[in-house]
Amino acid sequence: MGCSRFFSWFLILSVILEGVTLEVQGLACNWGSRASHPLPPKIAVQLLKDNGFNKVKLFEADPEPLKALGHSGIQVMVGIPNDLLLTLSSSVQAAINWVSQNVSTFISTHGVDIRYVAVGNEPFLKAYKHTFVNTTFPALQNIQAALIKAGLGQQVKATIPLNGDVYQTESGLPSGGDFRADIRDLMISITKFLSNNGAPLTVNIYPFLSLDADPNFPVDYAFFDGAASPVVDGSITYTNVLDANFDTLIFSLEKNGFGSMPVIIGEVGWPSDGTPSANIQNARRFNQGLLNRIFSGKGTPKRPSQPDIYLFALIDEDMKSVDPGNFERHWGLFYYDGTIKYPLDMGNGKSLVPAKGVKYLSRNWCVMSPQVSLLDPNVPGGISYACSYADCTSLGYGSSCGSLDARSNASYAFNMYYQTMDQRQGACSFNNLTVLTVIDPSRDGCRFEIMIDTGTHEKTPSARNSSRGKHVPSLLVLLHVLALIFCCMYWDLPSGSLF
């Protein structure tokens, strides 16, 4: 059996296991900090300001980012993670305490312009199997009561960021939209409560996921450049899935008596790595199209007035869960350190501005020793160990480093571990498989990273307390890398790409 046939079986197994007008008025984005080496908050805030972002959403009340946002002129939506919903739903006092510690204090003491509290994050996602169905609405009610008690009821609004799967259409057209049957009554109650308190509904929409999940999805329909075959819904014509998805929600609201309900798009973006459809070219195409829409003030056919749109996301996060896919760590407009991935027109002839003042670890890389054979039995175990603690998602099939030869694959894994461990003594040993080099091994769009020197910056938030999900090793990437090594060992494959 040839290596290519063998590798095909690994691919199959991997799939199974992969569980404003022309005068720009400002932009909004999400800032997550689930990273092994987070961008220092003051630098991140300056990055936001330099690139015209005047609104930001945090996934929870991390003190250091919130302090850095004080007196910045940036409006803030601060999140409450799902694991706090039970506590907040069962105790008004718990909600009062949370608002006091995480909203009132930062407004009064640090001058943070908090405008919204995001209660939970996509709590009714089908994948959660109703885990948060009984706690989300009571938590929202208690947080709203706590905001009123704190005298912030008019200044700060409570909302719930919802995934687009809370509504659906049986006809396949936006006009058939209605709330999902299993939570329809709950969604009506929540929407009425938000409306009564002058708060918006918040929805996260991901054209990328539509494309990535369905091999038959029309590719151009995910973008904004009018290349797709239109979808006709009565008198309305749709040329992109974002408009169609958003209007499905608007039809759902109309159908249930909330036709004028304000809506925020809480997350929308495109990842740049991790799967074949997550690449620099697609990310640039989507995000530039989205920015052009924002700058033009264009809404959707059903709701011509443009909603607030929070781009997802500001920077990459190498500690996010890869349960949804390896792309989860690559949503940023910028790399983890605030460097530019690809050019974007930010309006009025302005381009993206990179982060300033970032300090790095020494320019040393950990690579596989040229004296070590790929047949060494310690190689597969070393790669597996490295990728269990560091981010190897760029090695996956169709990713930015997926075309490396076997030795470079191993070097990438070893270096990511070495950098993630702050270049500590002993972090580049791997049973004598590796050596240090001062020559950058990066090539052909594959970046061998040097991490931020967090020790020389001010204190940064713990990766344990930010964004969504938890750090888990990518089984998909390990399968690809080990398959490549295995092929080279047993079929004596020459250097070259198998991915």
Image (cartoon, helix red, strand yellow):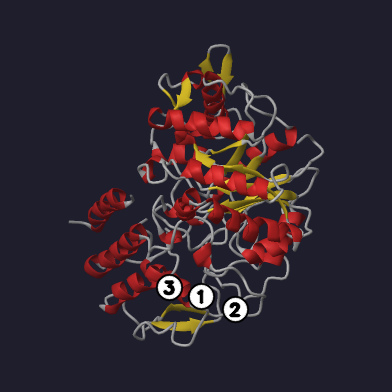
In the picture as drawn, the residue positioned furthest to the top comes out as: 235
Q: x and y percent of residue 178 in the render?
A: 47, 24
Quadrant of the snapshot with the C terminus: bottom left
Q: Would you place residue 398 above or below residue 217 in this image?
A: below
Residue 108 locus on image (x, y percent): 75, 59
CA separation, marks 2 and 3? 18 Å
Disc 3 marks a residue whose amino acid type is Ser
* Element type where label 2 sits in the image: loop
Quarter of the image for the N terminus: give it.
bottom left
User: Which residue is nearer to you in this view: 437 or 422?
Assistant: 422
Q: Residues within 10 Å of mark 1 (few under 14, many from 20)?
A: many
Question: What residue does disc 1 label?
Answer: 419
Distance between the alpha carbons at the discs numbered 1 and 2: 8 Å
Depth check, mark 1 against mark 3: the one in front is 1
- Which residue is depicted at the point 41% across and 71% down? 389
Label located before the other in sequence (1 or 3): 3
Residue 70 rendering spot, x and y as whole percentages: 75, 60
Residue at 69% x, 56% y: name it.
104
Residue 15 shows up from this direction: yes
**Left or right position of 482 against 82:** left
According to the picture, the residue beneath numbered tag 2 turns out to be 361
**Mark 1 or mark 2, which has the lower sequence index?**
2
